[in-house]
Image (cartoon, rainbow, N blue to C red):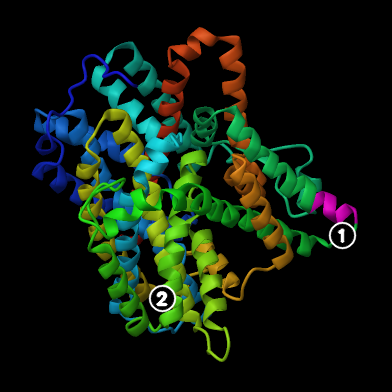
Amino acid sequence: MSQEPKGVKYASSFKEQFTARGMVIGSIGAIILTCSSMFVALKISSLPWPIMFVALLSMFCLKACKNTNINEINVTHTAMSAGAMVAGGLAFTLPGIWMLDPNADISAIMLIVVTLGGVILGLIFTSLIRKYFIVTKELPYPMGQAAAEALVVGDQGGKKAGILFGSLGIAAVFTALRDWFMVIPQMLPQAMSAKMLTYGSYTAVWLSPMLVSVGYIIGPVAIGVWFLGALIGDFGVLMGGTELGWWDVATAATVKQSLGIGLMVGTGIGIVVKGILPKAKEIFGPMFKNTTGDSIVALRWAPIAMVVLAFLFTIVCDMGVIASIVTIVGVWIATAMSAQCVGQSGINPMEIFGIIVLIVAKAASSIGNMAGIGEIAAFFVAAVVAVACGLVGDVMNDFKSGYILKSDPKAQWYAECIGSVIGAFVAVAVLLVIVQAYGGEVFGSEVFPAAQAGAVSAMVGGISNLPAFWIGLVLAVILYCVNFPVMTLGLGVYLPFYMSATAFVGGALRFILDRAAPKWSERGTGQIIAAGLLGGEAIVGVIIALIIAVQAISA
């Protein structure tokens, strides 16, 4: 979309993009989506990307208000979606506190400091790293691409709009039949699933239009590397290593998990060493000079904010000076990892980034004669990081849409500020209401399984297999420095096989169609269908989340 499509109205100024009515609509949407995101993340241990839902909802609301433009819609949906992943960052980490101690007494002030701390750090780093990942690296950000495609095609109308909304409707009906009426299975088991289950691997294909679309949009090269990681993790480590007698099934699982985490951490270090440090003056200059540089806005206040946050983490949250400093530095690396991961795969394992920094903070706090940090403080570290990474992952998709649509990134960043701060307070309020209504023992139960938070509680003790972790880390740094897409390799190793297999289907379809029907691909028909399929599942996922939230509140 290098040229402005015909029939689409663009803004001519900042004031036409960042509007009072847009922020009112965005704020109301942020409150609703944050509530639903908290409930669904705890209830079904997953969180659908909200960007397609909020993009189309913002377009509907603003067109009803008349005299809108595509950039005002883009800025509005940036505010509307920001709180959703803030809620996800909390839901995927903090319930682990009550899983270990159902009677844990956590004050609202502590939760507000942790959540706002993650939001403020996320705001700082989205401003600093946007240009590097969106403009310089030109990562695909499939969710952001799909949202931009939907807005442009929806605004233009015509045949392309029919293709978009037709595919969206098909995916929406399919998702409703699968997740609400449950007449379509979620998985398509393969013949060897039973055998692979003995090694702890579920080799199936997830019947997900959204993930197939992600694979199509990303393309066959990155998806091929992703699937290679899945083959290494499941058929190499789990089955191969066990069959060769290198380890038993239980140990194989720890090797796979630790190797995948090591690859992702190594990628983060590679990003910092190769991509960010050489551009440190341009990227971080706004934190020390009254200039924007590569940043969206001047951030001379950022170092002061970080010092204040370190003080609050230490005093209010009892995290200790060392852990507080490690947390802030860790967010710097983790948000870079999140931006890369979401940009290449459309997946944001925010709780994993939280676990990584948590482990480093515990180790650093235990050096010498220091007592280290307690369990609750360890969860706070993970939550700060997860909130920041969740916010960064979501908003970088919005920035990708904005870059395609030529929106003013400053307008988007201000909208992000509004939506994320609202989301912070709403997410904390919802979490406290759940604890008060059900008690801490509800987490980890059938009511609110909160699987990710359970994983965080299990990892409070540290990396389960350090040799595999270090092998993955060193290998990832080397591979990243030679421009190998190692983040997707690490995702493939770490994630369940069925997710990688489904994404691979989309990448394989793109490979076949680009060669069998090049003109069809050049016209962008495949991209439009992929955007519609992705949007259909994402929108129905959010609607189901809203229904679940309302039912939980009324119960």
Q: Image check: 2 left or right of 454? A: left
Tell me if residue 521 comes above or below residue 474 in the rendering.
above
Q: Quadrant of the N terminus?
A: top left
Q: Main secondary structure of the magenta part?
A: helix
The earlier-in-sequence mark between 2 and 1 is: 1
Residue tagged 1:
246
Picture quadrant where residue 538 is located:
top left
Q: Quick check: marks 2 and 1 in contact, CB under 8 Å?
A: no
Amino acid type of disc 2?
Ser
Q: Image check: 67 left or right of 481? A: left
Q: In which quarter of the image is the C terminus?
A: bottom left
Q: Is residue 496 magenta?
A: no
CA separation in Å, label 2 and label 1: 39 Å
Would you call the spot at circle 2 few (<14 residues within 10 Å), some (14-19), or many (20 or more)? Answer: many
Tell me if residue 253 comes above or below residue 479 in the rendering.
below
In magenta, the rendered stretch is: 238-244
Residue tagged 2:
324
Amino acid type of disc 1?
Trp
Tell me if residue 411 comes above or below residue 98 in the rendering.
above
Would you call the spot at circle 1 few (<14 residues within 10 Å), some (14-19), or many (20 or more)? Answer: few
